Amino acid sequence: MRTLLVAELADFLEGELNGPNVETVFGVSKIDQPIEGSLSFLANEKYEEHLYQTSASVVLVNKDFTPSKEVTLTLLRVQDPYMAFCKVLNQYFNPGVAKSGIENGATLAKSAKIGEYCYVGANTYIDEGATIGSNVKIFPNCFIGSGVTIGDNCLIYANVSIYNDCVLGSNTIVHSGSVIGCDGFGHAPQKDGSYVKIPQIGNVIIGSDVEIGSNCSIDRATMGSTIIHDGVRLDNLIQVAHNVEIGKHTVIAAQTGISGSTSLGSNCVVGGQVGFAGHLSIAKGTQIGAQSGLGKNVVEENTRLFGSPVQPLKDELKSQVIFRDLPNLKSRVDSLEKKINTKED
């Protein structure tokens, strides 16, 4: 368990300590599942009651927080307790921070360029002409293709493959099993029913501060680039097809599939298992519920959509209410038909 100096934490988080003098904490914990002597946080008022029962030694709270009962532990007042806790996790518990050096079994081509303070794990191969920035951590069993560029402070976890000529911006994270730059699904049908593969000669460009979950597949463009802009967050098991473009700070949940040449605007929120047809344009700020299917463009910004095919969220919810009531409606219709038939007789 990691030992942290409380005074150092207060300086790091630019916070103010109130309460008993505590020199150290031992690890971190959730406030409703505390570990004795640990650091925890209170970011949601509905958990306040745990503050008076927790065995944690120090709890991060908002600067303006006023306890409703007596507090016997130490409060570390910060601007945003949740974000402060995230900073602590990243600074002191990130598994890649302390890694450095080139492990035995790693292979670096002669023309590959590696920045300062990097880590390259065993059995990783970095091909000719690749350029790796400073403080990059590449875990074991990765493949970095020829001409790949990786910016500073990136984390590439185990078993990631990045094909030739792809570009990753700084502070980007790629989780295990993901493949960046594999061929797009391009096959030309022939008269005899067979297919001829269309060469995929483009690349993938990924911006800065992007996180890509595990087992994602991001296809290279047929020509040009598949582009994922700054700040995008992709969950696990996502398919991004060739020539797709994803705007800044868009968030996409697991098992979503985006067909070729579709463009998503900035700040979109996409639920799990959403399917996009090809060559669509999705306006910025669009929110799409899980398991929805999109087959046409979304023109209006900040639209909330749901269903398959999608429609405005309120309309879809009304439709679901009517659908659930269909057996009752059918019974009423049958009853009315009997009454009409009786009168006609």
Image: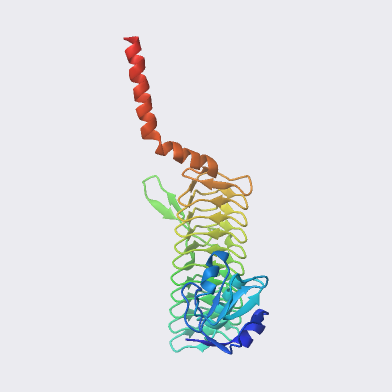
From the viewer's perspective, tell me whether residue 57 is left or right of residue 177. right
Would you say 48 lies left or right of 122 here?
right
Tally the marks: 0
Relative height, residue 40 to residue 266 (above, below): below
Query: Which residue is drawn at the image coordinates 46% and 74% (left, top)?
Result: 33
The residue at the far front in this view is 70
331 over 339 or under it: above or below: below
- Picture quadrant of residue 117: bottom right
Where's residue 6, x and y in %? 60, 86
Report which quarter residue 264 is drawn in.
bottom right
**Residue 262 position within the rendered picture, expressed as x and y whole percent measured from the top left:** 55, 52
User: Farthest residue toward the top?
Assistant: 345
Residue at position x 53%, y 67% in the image: 47
Choose top left, top right, bottom left or bottom right for residue 233: bottom right
Give the residue drawn at x 47%, y 62%: 183
Query: Residue 86: where, in percent of width, then height?
Result: 57, 74
Residue 309 visible in the picture: yes
Q: Is residue 130 visible?
A: no
Q: Return the residue nearer the eye: 144 or 285.
A: 285
Q: Quadrant of the C terminus?
A: top left
